[in-house]
Image (tube, rainbow, N blue to C red):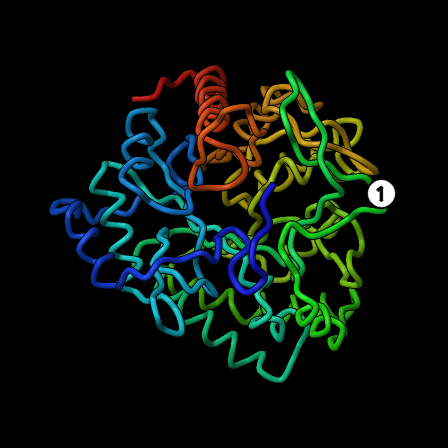
Amino acid sequence: MSRTDSTNNGDVTSDVDSRSINDFSTMIGNRTSSASSKIALAGHDGMKNAWAIRIATDEVLETSVQLGVENIIFYGGPGVDLLPASDVPHGKDRNTYEHYVALRERVESYGLTIAGCENGFISNPRFYDIAFGGPKRDELIDLVAAEITDMGRAGIPILAYNWMPNSVWRSGGTRIRGGTDVTAWDNAARDQSSIMYISDETQALLAEYDSSAENMWECLEYWIKTITPVAESAGIRLGIHPDDPPVPELGGVARLLGSFDACKRLTSIVDSPHNGIEFCQGTFSEMEDARNGGIYDMIKYFAERDKVLYVHFRNVSSTLPSFNEEFINTGYVDMKRAMETYAAAGYEGVFMDDHCPEIIGDTAFPGNWGGYRSRIFAQGYIQAMLEAVTGKRPD
């Protein structure tokens, strides 16, 4: 498991090359679509499969077409110093409307659709004033709001993000079927750390803020009430990833979204389709609330209310106090029952693979954990499950 740089988006590495924006524009121009500006909104056209990518290379887009992965989620968005779905720096305060249009047209030129963007801006120290209520909060919200507006105008239908200033944490790893490496968590473990590298300077900065749950809830409510009208006007849905692992505090910083009730509270701050949840089923399955069938109750509750923006369709070994990640079909959650629950609740959106195990000899995939073999295994499972539940075969 690799760590990421605390000065950048938690899902986008900070290693960049020296290519210019003009080089990126040339690459975009090679495959732009001359015919389609149609925007297919994820969440309103049936249940489908997707995967998430960090860099939209020709290889990964061509592979998507060949495997029938027609919906693409990309890591990026506000706070990232790279052009969307690329390793090229944009050299500005933020990405712009033109940058997002260029990406959308590139993806559409392959016959694919952008289903959303996954982001971790709140883990960037630059934006801590938003999370904790610092003096530059309104200025920074304006900056993020401007980019969200450009994303919506450019046809990006969803921006999913998290509220974990010190990112996802794990307490090590373990091995599952066939010696496959996966991450793990134990509440009692001494060796607990963020997957994101946090420098001493950043740790000292965090210590200067009021990181109590009370203050962070106040700041989250301020953010939601300010940003939701912006998203409504721009036509882009926003949703937050639950806290992984779902515990009350880590590294001296409160974690807010670690229970069913907390996520209900989030969606009630502003009751709008533009204030929802990036439904990481793996993280919800880690919650104590998931025991005794509770995971299916949570799926039903949020899907019935159209609060599920898209699904991280992954599995884990158990709920807290300890768990490890699993292959999509070896965890404790009945994945067929889960998908049937989404369908019965009226969910219409995408299911993406996530946190795939590290298979021996795999080749790197420009996305989240797990290489090509591991992700393709999960994709095959998702596509077969969709067909079994919906009766609809992929094109």
Residue 95 figure quarter? bottom left
Instruction: Tally the marks.
Output: 1
Above or below, 306 against 343 in this view is below
Asked if residue 350 lies left or right of residue 187, the reply is: left
Asked if residue 109 lies left or right of residue 189, the reply is: left
Is residue 183 among what the camera can see? yes
Is residue 264 among what the camera can see? no
Q: Residue at x 60, y 19 (%)?
A: 329
Above or below, 299 against 199 in this view is above
Q: Residue at x 23, y 37 (%)?
A: 110
Of 150 and 134, nearer the camera is 134
Q: Secondary structure at mark 1?
A: loop
Residue 99 figure quarter? bottom left
The residue lying furthest to the right in this view is 188
State the image coordinates of residue 371 (x, y, percent, origin top left): 48, 32
State the image coordinates of residue 36 (x, y, percent, origin top left): 17, 45
State the image coordinates of residue 390 (x, y, percent, origin top left): 45, 20
Q: Residue at x 52, y 74 (%)?
A: 141
Q: Which residue is mark 1?
A: 189
Above or below, 317 against 123 in this view is above
State the image coordinates of residue 367 (x, y, percent, origin top left): 46, 41
Of 354 and 238, nearer the camera is 354
The residue lying furthest to the left in this view is 34
Quarter of the picture holding the N terminus: top right
Q: Amino acid at mark 1?
A: Ala
- Answer few, some or many: residues within 10 Å of disc 1's Cα (few below 14, many 20 plus, some between 14 and 19): few
